[in-house]
């Protein structure tokens, strides 16, 4: 079906192939990635769920470790035969600090 992904600072990607390709590019340069959602709000409207949150992102790439925050909206559709399917992801970078403390070792 219809799939849309908007990464921070980028134009909308429409269609599964374009979205998949963008995530392959993200992960090709990533040693590891952790996204911890906070300020989560979910709204169910029939067979559609809208989830907004603050994404607290920790990422390690060959050039080092980075920390970022982004406001995100994710829209899911319930498919009776296979569960919830994400079909819209929109994320916008937020300047400032993480919404939670960093704990534990960096791996």
Image: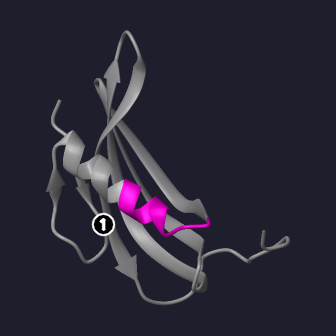
Drawn side of residue 23 relative to residue 99, left or right: left
Instruction: Identify the residue shown where x is 23% and y is 41%.
Output: 16
Camera-side residue: 8 or 106? Answer: 106
Q: Secondary structure at mark 1?
A: loop
Viewed as shown, does residue 99 lie left or right of 79? right
**Residue drawn at (55%, 70%) of the image:** 57
Q: Quadrant of residue 43?
A: top left
Q: Would you call the spot at circle 1 few (<14 residues within 10 Å), some (14-19), or many (20 or more)?
A: some
Q: Which residue is mark 1?
A: 7
- Against 33, residue 40 (above or below) is above
From which residue to which does the magenta span run? Answer: 24-31
Residue 47 shows in the view: yes
Q: Is 105 on the left or on the right of 7, as rendered?
A: right
Judge whether 12 appears above or below 100 on screen: above
Percent position (x, y) of residue 106?
A: 78, 73
Q: State the residue lying farthest toward the right.
A: 104
């Amino acid at each position: 079906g219809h799939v849309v992904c908007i990464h921070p600072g980028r134009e909308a990607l429409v269609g599964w192939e374009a979205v998949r390709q963008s995530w392959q590019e993200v992960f090709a340069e990533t040693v590891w990635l952790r996204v911890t959602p906070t300020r989560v709000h979910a709204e169910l409207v029939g067979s559609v769920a809208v989830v907004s949150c603050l994404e607290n992102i920790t990422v390690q790439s060959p050039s080092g470790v980075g920390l970022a925050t982004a406001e995100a909206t994710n829209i899911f559709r319930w498919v009776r035969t296979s569960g919830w399917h994400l079909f819209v992801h929109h994320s916008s970078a937020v300047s400032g600090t993480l919404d939670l403390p960093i704990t534990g070792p960096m791996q």
